[in-house]
Amino acid sequence: MNRVPAAFLAVLALAACNGGLFGTPSPTSPPPTATPTPQPLAASVNGEGILLSDFEDEIARFEAAQAVLGTDLASLGDYRSRVLQALIDRALLAQGAVAQGTEVDPAAVEAEVETLAEARGGSEAMGAWMAENRYTLDSFKEALREDMLSAAMVEEIDRDVGEFAEQVRAAHILVASREEADSLSAELAAGADFGDLARASSLDPSSRPAGGDLGWFPARFLLVPEVDMAAWELAPGETSDVIESALGYHIVRVLERGEHALSPDARRFLRERAVRDWLQARRAVAAIETYAVP
């Protein structure tokens, strides 16, 4: 069968646009143009789409990293949703940086690509790494650009954390039974030294040598929320009643309270909390749509 000439198909298309095969098109009519097919999205953040293909590539990279660590993916639950939320968070941070006037020079992105390529042994090795990790050069540059914007926003949030904060210095004694805790509480009420009892009886190996001293910490810093809450409810010199947690039974005493220099761990904690709080506030007002993710 003879193929229909392309020029004839063009005439048919033009005729359909003008109402008939023998109609006379206006000489000023623009030529027909193809409309690009929209790429499917995994999510939309304030009108900016996260491509489904980029999301699937990020999932593949996450799964590969877990395989290297020997992690059973079945033990991670709905990790696909968590990966998507991480991409949404990155988009929110990048948008926040742009809203504050931050720009990323394309030359800076190119320089970063060159630095990474040099670190990996040259452009050929870098190309192999990108292919293995499902990046094209363009998608890798875009990911770098968004990462640089996100990092700039995190630094801006971090400026509000500072080097000092309102903190508490507290000590605690941890024992396994309510009976022992009640007995120690009675000894403290009778005038026994808190530090001596902690060194003799506490089951917490990290604080026992220092007489139960937990050091200075900001609110919500401790891994045991019951101890953290008790410390912030007490005034310096006060001792708590017996407190139960998943670890056992505690007695808490506040030693000092006030503005104090942050330890590296405490500062990192406050920085991460500040970023989480910033993202929570942004999510509350952002137009975020997530689509079906198989």
Image (spheres, grey):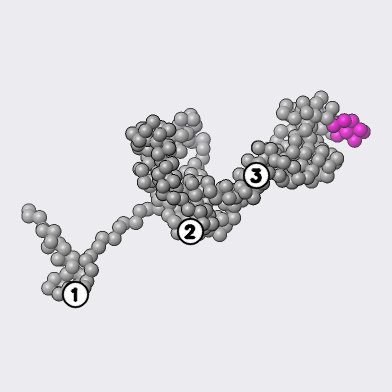
Circle nearer the N terminus (2, 3) = 2
Question: Is label 2 in a helix, a strand or a loop?
Answer: loop
Give the crowd class for mark 3: few <14, some 14-19, many >=20 residues within 10 Å. Answer: many
Circle nearer the N terminus (1, 2) = 1
Q: Amino acid at mark 3?
A: Leu
**In the rendered view, does 105 fall on the left or right side of 251?**
left
Cα distance in 3D space between marks 2 and 3: 27 Å
Residue name at image x 78 percent, y 31 percent = 212
69 in the magenta segment:
no
Residue name at image x 48 percent, y 46 percent = 147
In the rendered image, which residue does mark 3 sit on?
270
Image mark for residue 174: none
Total marks in image: 3
Can you give x and y, in whole percent of width and height, for residue 195 in the image? 83, 30
Residue name at image x 37 percent, y 35 percent = 126
Which secondary structure is most common in the magenta stretch? helix
Residue 51 sits above or below residue 194 on the image: below
In the rendered image, which residue does mark 2 sit on?
46
In the rendered image, which residue does mark 1 sit on?
26
**In the rendered view, does 157 fall on the left or right side of 163?**
left
Can you give x and y, in whole percent of width and height, for residue 130 in the image? 37, 38
Which residues are the magenta region? 184-194
Q: Amino acid at mark 1?
A: Ser
Residue 192 sits above or below residue 165 on the image: above
**In the rendered view, does 269 fall on the left or right side of 119?**
right
